[in-house]
Structure formats: structure tokens, C-alpha cells
């Protein structure tokens, strides 16, 4: 079976109408993913007996809104989740899906995940009321999905930076809309991953970055060295760190001073040397 990207980019050399009636559902799924498939055929495939064909239609950005609305009420939760992930899904569709209780077992985490609600929470078309509803969900993964949405209000973010789940706090730290004061607060989080994520956010204020650049953890310093807003003086300090990964991050930072790069070009570690010399070139 082809990958999803292969299915999306498939060149249809045969008559699409004939392909839509193929006995092989894999062929029909490829057709359903393809951006050149007509709206009429997509609407036809939206009634396919195989859920994976309908899921592909639900994920196709060319699928008509009326067809997406019908698929939002599909019997398969995977199809409904695909609708929620479609950038053409309307706020009305998303609102109706926000209470969807469909779950699927995540073997990695060994727990059930609310796939539809998580997908809705990530959508750029979600209305503020629906996003607030999901931001208060009892499931941490649903809240974490909402925490990553740039449409989240500062008022909600202020509450979510104190969430019991580090996943939620981590996504607030990653969110490009998070206010500077909340990012500064998250740089003091007890979980290292959250501090590292805040260290990478370009909106994190300079004072907080200066503190992170002197964090006892080399992982935090490495993340800070990758921040495109870190100033040259702090980068020069980090260029002397014992970890080659920190020094390599310094070498790759666009704000690193020429004299710092010159020093790193003679670093004993080859990866650091290569990064510094490529910048010099």
C-alpha cells in the first residue's frame, strides 16, 4: 500500500470514473486523496463502504463543504477525525464534533486517545467558544491539543500554564501566540522538557533567555543556543560549554558573532567545526 503522500500525489492515467468503481479499495482510496479528483467523484466516494476510502475523502482539501458536513456525521470515528483535520472544515462542523467521544488505543502510551476532539482542538477554523470548551476537557491530550492552538486566548493560557499535565504546559511554551510573561513563567517549570521548549520559543524575553543560558542542564543550554533571538554575547559564553551539542547549536545560530564562529571553526569536535565553517562560507 502506498504512503499517504504517494496517494495524494498520484497521477491518474485512467478514467477517474472507472477508478472510482474499482474492486480494489486501495485504488479508490488513492483516487479519494488525489487533489485532481473532481468534486462529483469525491462526493460519490464519500459513500464508499470502506471507511478508509471515506477517510481519504474527508481529508482531501478539495472535498466540497456539503460533502464534509455529511462525513462529519459518519459512523466511523476515523472519518470524523479526518474531517476535523481538514482545513476546509467549518466552525459549525467543528463545534458539532467537539463533544465526540470516539477513542482509539495508543499502544505507545497504553491509553485511549480522543482522536476527534484532539483534531478539533488543533483546527485553525475553530471558534473561541469551542476552543475554550476543549481547553477545559478532562483529558490531558485534548487540553494539550488546545494549548498548541495559536487562537487560544491569553486568559486561557494564563490558567493552562499551571495545568497538572506537563504536556499542556509544554504546548503553551511552544505556542507562537503565548505572551512573553507566560513564557518567562514557563522557563522556571520543574519539568526540563517544558523549560527547553520555552527556551526555543522566539517570543521568550531576553531576560529569561539569559537565565536559561546558565541553566545547570546542558540540554536547556543547547535549546537556548538554538533560539534565533539570543544575543551574540550570550552565544559567545555558550561557545565555551563542555558539550559539543551546545557549541554546535551556537555555531548554527544566525546571531553568533564572527569572532565566535572563528573560534568554533577550530573546535576539537568535527561537528562543531563543520557547522562553524559552513556559516563562515
Image: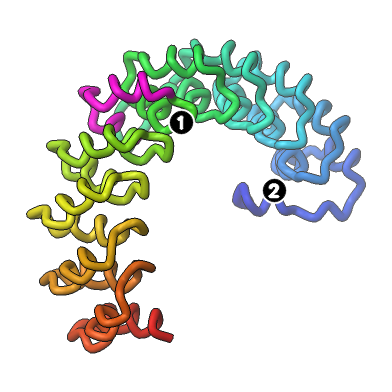
Instruction: Label 1: state its secondary structure.
Output: loop
Residue positioned 59% across, 18% down in the render? 94
Q: Is residue 222 above or below residue 263?
A: above
Residue positioned 92% across, 46% down in the render? 15
Tell me the residue that label 1 is attached to. Answer: 149
Q: Is residue 39 above or below residue 70?
A: below
Q: Position of residue 118 (x, y in %)?
A: 45, 25
The foreground one among 235 and 64 is 235
- Residue 245 seen by the camera: no
Q: From the image, give the main secondary structure of the stretch colored magenta.
A: helix
Question: Badge 1, how many Cα within 10 Å: few under 14, some, many 20+?
Answer: many
Question: Badge 2, how many Cα within 10 Å: few under 14, some, many 20+?
Answer: some
Determine the CA span between mark 2 and mark 1.
Answer: 26 Å
Looking at the rendering, the stretch of residues picked out in magenta corresponds to 153-171
* In this rendering, position of residue 164 left or right of residue 69: left
The foreground one among 219 and 4 is 219
Which is more N-terminal, label 1 or label 2?
2
Instruction: Label 2: state its secondary structure.
Output: helix
Tell me the residue that label 2 is attached to. Answer: 8
Report which quarter residue 266 is drawn in: bottom left
Residue positioned 17% across, 51% down in the render? 212
Q: Is residue 114 above or below residue 204?
A: above
Q: Position of residue 58 (x, y in %)?
A: 68, 29
Q: Position of residue 253 (x, y in %)?
A: 34, 67
Amino acid at each position: 500500500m502506498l504512503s499517504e503522500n504517494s496517494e495524494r500525489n498520484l497521477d491518474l492515467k485512467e478514467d477517474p470514473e472507472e477508478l472510482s468503481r474499482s474492486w480494489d479499495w486501495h485504488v479508490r482510496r488513492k483516487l479519494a486523496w488525489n487533489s485532481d479528483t473532481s468534486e462529483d467523484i469525491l462526493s460519490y466516494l464519500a459513500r464508499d463502504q470502506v471507511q478508509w476510502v471515506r477517510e481519504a475523502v474527508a481529508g482531501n482539501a478539495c472535498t466540497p463543504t456539503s460533502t464534509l458536513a455529511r462525513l462529519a456525521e459518519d459512523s466511523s470515528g476515523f472519518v470524523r477525525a479526518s474531517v476535523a483535520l481538514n482545513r476546509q472544515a467549518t466552525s459549525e462542523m467543528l463545534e458539532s464534533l467537539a463533544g465526540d467521544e470516539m477513542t482509539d488505543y495508543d499502544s505507545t502510551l497504553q491509553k485511549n486517545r480522543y482522536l476527534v476532539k484532539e483534531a478539533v482542538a488543533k483546527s485553525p477554523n475553530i471558534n473561541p467558544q469551542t476552543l475554550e470548551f476543549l481547553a477545559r476537557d478532562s483529558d490531558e491530550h485534548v487540553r494539550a491539543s488546545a494549548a498548541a492552538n495559536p487562537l487560544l486566548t491569553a486568559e486561557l493560557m494564563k490558567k493552562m500554564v499551571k495545568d497538572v499535565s506537563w504536556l499542556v504546559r509544554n504546548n503553551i511554551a511552544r505556542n507562537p501566540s503565548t505572551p512573553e510573561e507566560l513564557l518567562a513563567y514557563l522557563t522556571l517549570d520543574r519539568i526540563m522538557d517544558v523549560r527547553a521548549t520555552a527556551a526555543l520559543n522566539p517570543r521568550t524575553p531576553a531576560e529569561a533567555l539569559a537565565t536559561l543560558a546558565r541553566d545547570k542542564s546542558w540540554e536547556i543550554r543547547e535549546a537556548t543556543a538554538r533560539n534565533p533571538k539570543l544575543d551574540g554575547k550570550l552565544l559567545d559564553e555558550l561557545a565555551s560549554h563542555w558539550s559539543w551539542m551546545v557549541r554546535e547549536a551556537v555555531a548554527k545560530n544566525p546571531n553568533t558573532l564572527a569572532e565566535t564562529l572563528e573560534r568554533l571553526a577550530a573546535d576539537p569536535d568535527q561537528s562543531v567545526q563543520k557547522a562553524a565553517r559552513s556559516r563562515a562560507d
